[in-house]
Image: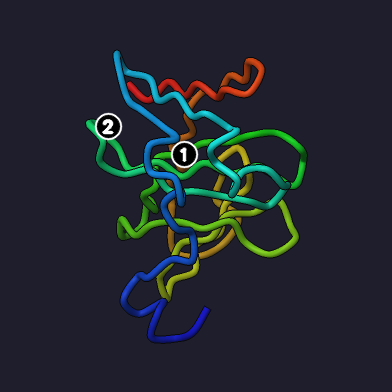
Amino acid sequence: MGFFKMLFGICRTAPPTEEDCWRFANGKIEIDLDRAPELKNQGGAIRLEGNGSPERVLVIHGRDGQFHAYKNRCTHVGRRIDPYSEDKLLRCCSISKSTFDYEGNVISGSAKKPLTPFKVEQEGGKLTLSVV
């Protein structure tokens, strides 16, 4: 990621191309995986914002084959986070480059507190995230 993108906190992870592949209701986010091609392969990710959700959420199809979801806010300065490299890591989209593991634990950087993970359940072609 370039210096200016980090300086301004611009992340690589985009919203889903099919904006209506997800919905928020009753404290949960439901994602239709058939309509979220970004999550088809390991390493893929989307960021979910708005749509009634009280939180910005990062959803990744991890390199470990599992789906993971987090409050998309670094605990250092509140910037968004991105999956990082081929490793099972996440990194803040800022110049501090705080790095976290899939459990949300701080590995390096300025952050002192872990990320907030959300419970993810997969049933068939649907993911359900408990965000409240």
**Horizontal arrangement in the rendering, residue 4 relative to residue 124 (left or right):** left
The residue labelled by disc 1 is 70
Where does the image place residue 79, in percent across and percent down from the top left? 34, 60
The quadrant of the picture occupied by the C terminus is top left
Number of the front mark, 1 or 2? 2
Q: Who comes first in sequence, dot 1 or dot 2?
A: 2
Q: Considering only vertical position in the picture, is 48 above or below 93?
A: above
Q: Using the image as rendered, state which of residue 49 and residue 80 is in the foreground.
A: 49
Q: Is residue 90 above or below residue 54?
A: below
Label 1 crowd (10 A; few <14 / some 14-19 / many >=20): many
Which residue does the numbered mark 2 point to in the structure image? 53
> What is the distance, in whole Å, between disc 1 and disc 2 at their CAs?
13 Å
Specify the farthest residue to the bottom: 3
Q: Position of residue 112 (x, y in %)?
A: 43, 52
Amino acid type at mark 2: Ser
Lateral position of residue 74 relative to residue 2, left or right: left
